[in-house]
Amino acid sequence: MAKKERKLTGWHVLAIFGGAFGVIITVNIALAVNAVATFPGLEVKNSYVASQTFDRRRAEQEALGWTVEARLEADKLILSITDNEGRPVQAGTLSAVVGRPTNVSEDRTPEFAFNGREYVAYETLNPGNWDVWLTATALDGSLFEQRLEMTIGG
């Protein structure tokens, strides 16, 4: 029995190219939809308006001389705020959002309590990179905002 020779026609080439580009376009659409669905949002609604007060807010915050560190010890999320001389600082108000840098699905707002030295909240965080978006006010009313990065080992 003789083997029939197949020819590569223009329609075959068109189908191959169409299929390949179809796969590429489908993957790109899937990645774009996932990127938009997990985007955490904007830092500020209007960057121009925020820039008008940036220098004043930065100067007020730097004048406080606060240093902030975040760490996880067992099931406790600890925020240490110290002044220029290394003394603990108790803020007038303090709130924080803890979440992943790339999406908002694990964001949470812990309830911090000041123990005389540090702010402590009971949280269980999965391994990986985490951000703490801290907002506090000093006793004189100065606003303090900072994003802290943490890496939790696995």
Image: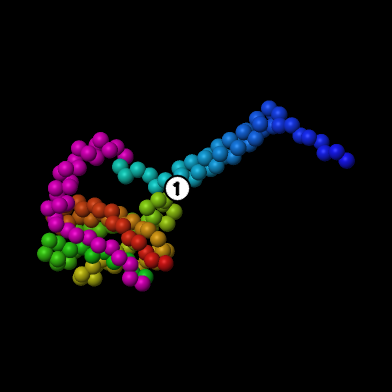
**Left or right position of 139 against 16:** left
Q: Circle 1 sits on which residue?
A: 38
Q: Quadrant of the C terminus?
A: bottom left
- Tell me if I can see residue 33 in this picture: no
Q: Position of residue 150 (x, y in %)?
A: 32, 60
Q: Residue at x 25, y 53 (%)?
A: 146
Q: Residue at x 20, y 37 (%)?
A: 52
Q: Which residues are magenta?
A: 45-74
Q: Position of residue 93 (x, y in %)?
A: 23, 58
Q: Is 71 or 113 nearer to us in this picture? A: 71
Vertical order, 31 against 80 (above or below): above
Q: Residue at x 76, y 34 (%)?
A: 6
Q: Residue furthest top?
A: 10
Query: Residue 74 sits in which quadrant?
Result: bottom left
Q: Amino acid at mark 1?
A: Thr
**Left or right position of 2 against 44:** right
Could you say whether the residue bearing mark 1 is in a helix, strand or loop?
helix
Q: Residue at x 71, y 29 (%)?
A: 9
